[in-house]
Image (tube, rainbow, N blue to C red):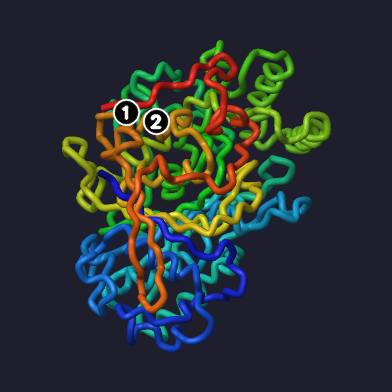
């Protein structure tokens, strides 16, 4: 049975300021916080702590000064990577929607702060704790540092512990877009430890998929690198050496919807450990009848747009046609809006979920010594802690509406956590391929979960006078959505728990059984 720890806290981050001090002194952190225990209580910090407690980490010593929740996952002197979701530094929806903000787009700094405290507790002041993320190409990492309070956190740990919280922007390039066209590029230092090519070969989720590598399209104009790294028995990814060689990865995703995979959550958050996102297949050229998943059906306007997009890629790849294509995209937005399906942004995308599951195989079967394709199970621990204090729905992952939930989830199994998160959203996991197929696969398994009955929820119930309170354990099926989410337009009426059994001619998949 796979357990998911659940804690309820405030459904907002109001009243908090970097470096996000806890405002109370848990016994296990006594003497390690400096003046950080003073002031108003940080309910987000308490919820993170309660989720780790509910998960059962170091249960024998809970509520004692010796409690060390990450101590069984990483040794003193080891290295911990904290992997947030810092996809972009603004939410365009907030310009017109008062119920939208950056808070539903990125992992909040208060989550990072709490996990950094417990990471340093486990590895000691001489160990390494590293915040590492490859945000979207056009994200300003300086803005992210400010929003998340990373510099203030660095100063706190230097002053309180004499320890260094490392912060790494894993990207090798920053770009500026105007009307969907790259107008400038800037090289970045990237991972100081470099990058590692990880080739799953024929143990990839793309094996026997029927997908034509020549139709694969990635994150940049030139499709050649995407196809080349996923053809002739090769399925390779360029990943951060800092992440792969770490002793423990703490995955810190945001709960929100996603245009290409339905939801973001634990599995999708591993996209942010890449050194070259053009090695990542995002969709395949053309309609389903053509062997692609770019758009549904075969409408003339969509086929014409696809051809124009390919023509535009070729021109832009040679530095030509920028102004013309910008004008076209402005006109298209005025005529069709922004919710029409394009670039694989719909439930028929057969590509992104495979890439996402591949990345998890790369992570769970790699360590400092390399890739272990012959291992019977994962060779490294990954702890996932999900930020659902303020979650996001509608046009995720970039233009979300704020959904105040006040929940933190924690798990050692990423699929168990994603199942719990999907239930909180009011979605049907059997219609989300990356979750359904990860459960079904026996090749390089990344989960022990085969169906919803394999997951239990352990919910922390704080009681007056107790530091951690008690824990109530119940079945996943008893976890209800307090407020059903609205999916991305390309997934609307497809993944909701109340969706019809047959949508757009696609039968609802059977639940995976043992």
| Marker disc for residue 440 | 1
Q: Residues within 10 Å of mark 2 (few under 14, many from 20)?
A: many
What percent of the width, then of the height, locates residue 447? 29, 40
| Marker disc for residue 436 | 2
Residues at discs 1 and 2 in contact (Cβ within 8 Å):
yes
Q: Residue at x 55, y 48 (%)?
A: 482
Using the rendered image of the protein, determine whether residue 170 is visible from the camera's viewpoint: no
Looking at this view, is 244 or 406 the one in front?
406
Q: Is residue 200 above or below residue 401?
A: above
Q: Quadrant of residue 202?
A: top left
Using the rendered image of the protein, determine whether residue 356 is visible from the camera's viewpoint: yes
Q: Residue at x 59, y 42 (%)?
A: 485
What percent of the width, then of the height, locates residue 129? 35, 68
Q: Quadrant of residue 340?
A: top right
Spatial CA span between label 1 and label 2: 6 Å
Q: Is residue 356 above or below residue 190?
A: above
Q: Is residue 372 above or below residue 234?
A: below
Q: Residue at x 57, y 75 (%)?
A: 17
Looking at this view, is 386 or 53 the one in front?
53
| Marker disc for residue 268 | none
Quadrant in which the C terminus is drawn: top left
């Amino acid at each position: 049975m796979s357990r998911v720890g659940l804690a309820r806290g405030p459904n907002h981050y109001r009243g908090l300021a970097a470096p996000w001090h806890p405002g109370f002194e848990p016994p296990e952190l006594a003497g390690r916080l400096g003046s950080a225990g003073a002031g108003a209580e940080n309910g987000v910090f308490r919820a993170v702590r309660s989720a780790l407690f509910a998960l059962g980490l170091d249960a024998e010593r809970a509520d004692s000064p010796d409690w060390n929740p990450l101590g069984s996952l990483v040794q003193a002197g080891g290295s911990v990577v904290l992997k947030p979701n810092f996809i972009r530094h603004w939410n365009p929806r907030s310009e017109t929607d008062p119920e939208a903000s950056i808070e539903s787009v990125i992992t909040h700094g208060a989550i990072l702060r709490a996990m950094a405290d417990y990471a340093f507790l486990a590895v000691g002041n001489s160990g390494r704790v590293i915040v590492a993320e490859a945000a979207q190409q056009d994200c300003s990492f300086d803005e992210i540092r400010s929003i998340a309070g990373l510099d203030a956190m660095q100063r706190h740990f230097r002053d309180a512990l004499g320890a260094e919280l490392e912060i790494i922007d894993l990207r090798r390039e920053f770009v500026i877009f105007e009307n969907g066209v790259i107008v400038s590029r800037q090289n970045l230092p990237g991972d100081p430890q470099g990058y590692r090519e990880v080739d799953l070969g024929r143990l990839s989720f793309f094996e026997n998929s029927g997908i034509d590598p020549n139709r694969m399209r990635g994150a940049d104009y030139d499709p050649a690198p995407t196809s080349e790294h996923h053809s002739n028995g090769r399925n390779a990814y360029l990943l951060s050496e800092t992440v792969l060689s770490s002793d423990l990865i703490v995955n810190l995703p945001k709960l929100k919807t996603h245009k290409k995979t339905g939801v973001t959550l634990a599995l999708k958050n591993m996209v942010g450990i890449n050194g070259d996102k053009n090695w990542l297949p995002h969709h395949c050229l053309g309609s389903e009848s053509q062997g692609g998943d770019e758009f549904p059906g075969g409408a003339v306007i969509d086929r014409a747009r696809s051809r124009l997009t390919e023509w535009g890629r070729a021109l832009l790849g040679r530095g030509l046609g920028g102004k013309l294509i910008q004008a076209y995209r402005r006109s298209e937005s005025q005529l069709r809006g922004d919710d029409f399906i394009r670039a694989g942004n719909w439930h028929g995308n057969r590509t992104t979920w495979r890439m996402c599951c591949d990345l998890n195989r790369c992570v769970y079967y790699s360590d400092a010594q390399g890739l272990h394709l012959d291992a019977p199970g994962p060779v490294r621990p990954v702890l996932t802690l999900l930020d659902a204090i303020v979650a996001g729905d509608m046009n995720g992952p970039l233009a979300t509406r704020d959904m105040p939930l006040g929940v933190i989830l924690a798990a050692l199994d990423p699929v168990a956590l994603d199942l719990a998160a999907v239930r909180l959203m009011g979605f049907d996991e059997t219609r989300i391929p990356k979750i359904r197929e990860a459960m079904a696969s026996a090749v390089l398994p990344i989960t022990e979960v085969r169906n919803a009955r394999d997951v239990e929820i352990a919910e922390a119930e704080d009681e007056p006078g107790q530091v951690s309170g008690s824990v109530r354990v119940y079945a996943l099926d008893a976890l209800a959505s307090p407020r059903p989410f609205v999916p991305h337009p390309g997934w609307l009426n497809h993944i909701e728990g109340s969706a019809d059994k047959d949508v757009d001619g696609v039968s609802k998949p059977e639940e995976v059984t043992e």
